[in-house]
Image (tube, rainbow, N blue to C red):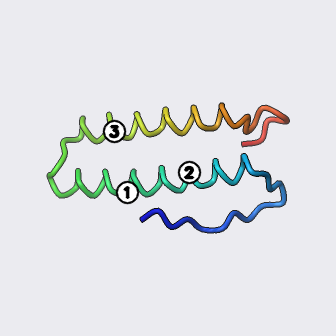
Amino acid sequence: MEAHGSYRGDDWSPQRLVFNQNLETFAERVGLIVGLQSNGKMSQDQAYAQIRKLWKSLRASKDSLLIGKDNGKV
């Protein structure tokens, strides 16, 4: 499940590549959580808490990689 697509962008950098991989991981995990919640394996509150935790982790990743601090781009 950790297979990532290739980064396609004019503004390639190692930091952006890492952030892109983190973004793909976030999307995969959110999809899994939604599936678990939809099938009754997880409550809505648990799903929300898990997704919120993942979001905070993604935001911290963005901030630590300095994405978007140079000229307002994400």
Mark 2 and 1 residues: CB-CB less than 8 Å, in contact? no
Q: What amino acid does circle 1 point to?
A: Gly
- Of the numbered discs 2 and 1, the one sitting upstream in the chain is 2
Which residue position holds label 3? 50
Q: CA distance from mark 2 to mark 1?
A: 12 Å
Give the x, y percent position of residue 10: 84, 60
Which residue position holds label 2? 23
Where, quadrant-wise, is the N terminus in this rendering? bottom left
Residue 65 picture quarter? top right
Q: Give SS at disc 2.
A: helix
Q: Give SS at disc 1.
A: helix
Q: CA distance from mark 3 to mark 2?
A: 15 Å
Residue at position x 57%, y 32% in the image: 60
Q: What amino acid does circle 3 point to?
A: Gln
Give the x, y percent position of residue 7: 69, 63
Q: CA distance from mark 3 to mark 1?
A: 12 Å
Badge number at residue 31: 1
Give the x, y percent position of residue 59: 57, 34
Q: Nearer the viewer, mark 2 or mark 1?
A: 2
